[in-house]
Amino acid sequence: MSRLFIDQQQPRIMRAHNSWAAAITASADAVGLDRKLVELVNLRVSQLNGCGICLDTHHRKAIEAGETERRIAVLPAWRHVDLYSEEERAALGLAEAITHLPDTETQDAAYAMAAAVFNDDQLAVVSWVAVAINSFNRVSITSHHPVRPRKEQA
């Protein structure tokens, strides 16, 4: 069954949504968050939500930011491999807690881990990155945005 692309049906809302996301990206840069860390959060949340279009988009953006295929491939197992920094682990844990909204104790543990490695501005922006990608995932999943073939670069 085809679905209405809600972003195209209400483009004014989507433009505001995109402006909001651009402000979050600018804040990530302003507070010194590595672009690779931001893209890891975007990828992990999109994996959890099963958003193909966002996974496709943020895989490409992660590679452009200097991320490796290896670290992207094992991202679902980030807790069980030694390929991620303390900051990346903290950001991924916080992003998962924001995505799943687990019990308060689990949320508090993820928050405490993130608060131990990020300053308040960075902690806020990592949280906003997770909230934003969750929002974009919902738009794309609701609309059934397809992942279309593209010409791969050599």
Image: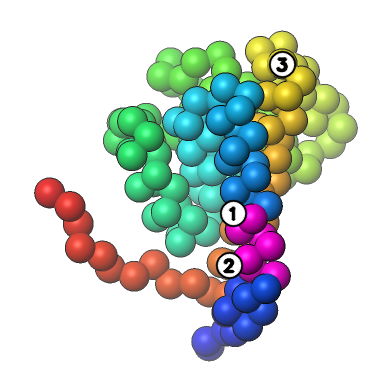
Q: Amino acid at mark 3?
A: Asn
Residue flagged by tag 1: what amino acid is it?
Asn
- Residue displayed at 58% across by 67% down: 141
Q: Position of residue 109 (x, y in %)?
A: 77, 21
Residue assigned mark 1: 49
Q: Which residue matches tag 3?
A: 119
Q: Amino acid at mark 2?
A: Ile
Q: Observer-nearest residue: 27 or 46?
A: 27
Tell me the magenta residue range.
13-19
Question: Is 59 or 93 nearer to us in this picture?
Answer: 59
Closest to the camera, between mark 1 and mark 3, is 3
Asked whether, in this view, residue 122 is left or right of residue 87, the answer is right
Q: Earlier in the sequence, mark 2 or mark 1?
A: 1
Binning the other alpha carbons within 10 Å of mark 3 as few (below 14), some (14 to 19) or many (20 upward) gives: few
Cα–Cα gap, marks 2 and 3 = 33 Å
Q: Is residue 77 visible?
A: no
Quick one: SS at disc 3? loop
Circle 2 is placed at which residue position?
141
Q: From this viewpoint, which residue is outermost toward the right?
A: 104
Coloring scheme of the render? Answer: rainbow
